[in-house]
Amino acid sequence: MAKVIIGGKEETYEEGTRLVDIAAKHQSEFKDDIVLAKYKGSLTELSKAVTGVAEVEFLTTADKDGRRAYRRSVVFLLQRALMDVYPLPSNPYLRVEHSLGQGDFCTLEGVGEITEEDLEELKKVMLDLVEKDVPLKKYSIKTTQAKEMFHSFNMKDKEQLLKYRTSSNINVYDLDGCIDYFYGYMVPSTKYLKYFDLLKFEHGFMLLYPDGSLPGKDTRKVAEFKKPMKLFNVQQAASDFGQIMGVPTVGALNEVIAKGNIRDLVLSQEAIFERNIGELASIIASNKDVKFVMMAGPSSSGKTTFSHKLSAQLRALGCVPHPLPLDDFYLDRDQMPIDEYGEKDFEAIEGLDIPYFNECMVKLLNGERVLLPNFNFKIGKREYNDHYMQLGKNDILVIEGIHGLNDRMSSSLPAESKYKIYLSALTQLSIDEHNPLSTADGRLIRRIVRDARTRATSAAETIAMWDSVRRGEEKNIFPFQEKADYIFNTALIYEMAVLKLYVDPMLYAIEPDHPMYAEAKRLIKLLDYFLPMAPDVIPNNSLVREFIGGSCIL
């Protein structure tokens, strides 16, 4: 008999009982649907059979790993439904382009423009498959066999990616005759995939999911889609750039590295990056009413390097930029608001002295000389260290902070005096046709590398705080991105290949018994798809240097 320990209580089952059957007995104890488990300390699918004695922890769609499994599985469900709606030989080429809000933007190649009627039919077939409770079967095959199979399926991106895969075997999934390769765990069967929607959008459609990003969200209700057009247009521009450069996928990047052409790609990317900043600076400089550049973006977007580069471009146009961090307007630490966990919330807008900030900015706008504060993080108090400022005709304040785009922060300033910039690393790369590279993963990897170098923070420590960072972004940054006058993409098409060299050893240092091991293992697997590239071809003024070191502008 097998023994499992769940929530400190021991239960006995026949050897070989699957976790999915045990989960069914415990589902009533959870508000959200169980989709994965931790078994003997490792993340695993519910199809796993139990043996011996082991602790089991169930994960739901409210957990980040559960959400990932759910969304992957819904994409697979969509692929299978396409086989019925568009049978061979007209089976279209599905591309999951990028995430947008709580969904994925998808396109179909080879069938013309998709209509609302087409989507209704697709959704009906998907729901029929959910009703039939079709299993998602996993099995292992030779990598060489997989390449041949994906070649026959016309899955060119997967075929190219596997060209650089060193392992001899890979796991593939079969959903009622639809076979694919995914980059993480899946749900046991289609009955788990009840909550999704398809919505016509631009030249493709949205595959929408529930929102489990913050505590209290309803994971059994599809999130509202608010059509973030500014973000979408920047993401499309990034995708178009990847196509123009001939590097839309990880496999294509690996080809460039393997053939020794990476220097040309780096120089082209950096030139375009500088050109885009120059164009943005010209927009700002041409508007003489603008005195405050308000800048915000999620963690590890490269805000520090970007602000220096933008300031340099503004100076070249005759402006006199002055950096000003919003952090200097923090309330003293003993006045900080308390979050739902009873901890001081340093990311809440209520932790900033909003009236005082507005008072200072209005005085500056009126030409007055103002003594500005500096926040001393060691003692947790504001200080006044002879930091006087008075704005002249060509002076511009470049203000950076997580609440820079929130109108509450600068409500006393006239709209025409402000120019708002949202920064984010919106990667151009996809892993393959069905799996866009997560922008959050890219930023996490940036942060692991930077914090180890500049703050002596281990990879495990950075990963441990990442969930809290992400919650803060969901509450305080992402809701305001569409309020920006300009969204600037700081992702560089080659960066994961060079970050891999730095982050891999840090991730491998996390031991199997560490709570962050599962996440480290996931990131290692992701980075395993990239060929590494040496940093010597990267210019010393590149934004990537903010993370790996060697920057000449910081």
Image (cartoon, rainbow, N blue to C red):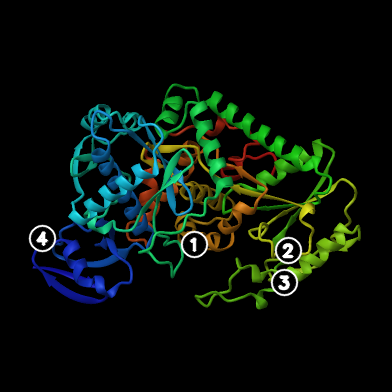
Q: Please tell me which of labels 4 and 1 falls first in the chain.
A: 4
Relative side of 451 to 397, left or right: left
Real-space CA distance between mark 4 and mark 1, rounded to the nearest whole angstrom: 37 Å
As drawn, the label of residue 64 is: none
Q: Earlier in the sequence, mark 3 or mark 4?
A: 4
Q: Secondary structure at mark 4?
A: loop
Q: Is residue 432 visible?
A: yes
Residue under numbered circle 3: 381
In the image, what residue occupies the spot 19% across and 71% down? 25
Question: Are the residues at dot 3 and dot 2 in contact (C-beta closer than 8 Å)?
Answer: no
Instruction: Quote the CA–CA distance across marks 3 and 4.
Output: 60 Å
Residue 216 occupies quadrant: bottom left
Amino acid type at circle 4 is Gly
Give the number of marks. Answer: 4
Looking at numbered disc 1 in the image, what kind of residue is underneath it? Met
Mark 1 closeness class: few <14, some 14–19, many ≥20 residues within 10 Å: few
Mark 4: few/some/many CA within 10 Å (<14, 14-19, 20+) = few
- For image coordinates 28% across by 56% down, the residue present is 193
| Disc assigned to residue 465 | 1
In the displayed structure, 506 sits above or below 492; it is below
Q: Which residue is mark 2?
A: 328
Q: Which residue is mark 4?
A: 16
Position of residue 110 measured from the top left corner of the image (x, y, whole percent): 35, 29
Q: Nearer the viewer, residue 437 or 202?
A: 202
Identify the mark nearer the N-term, 4 or 2: 4
Distance (Cα) linking label 3 and label 1: 24 Å
Mark 3 and mark 2 lie on one chain; the one further toward the N terminus is 2
Q: Secondary structure at mark 2?
A: helix
**Camera-side mark, 3 or 2:** 2
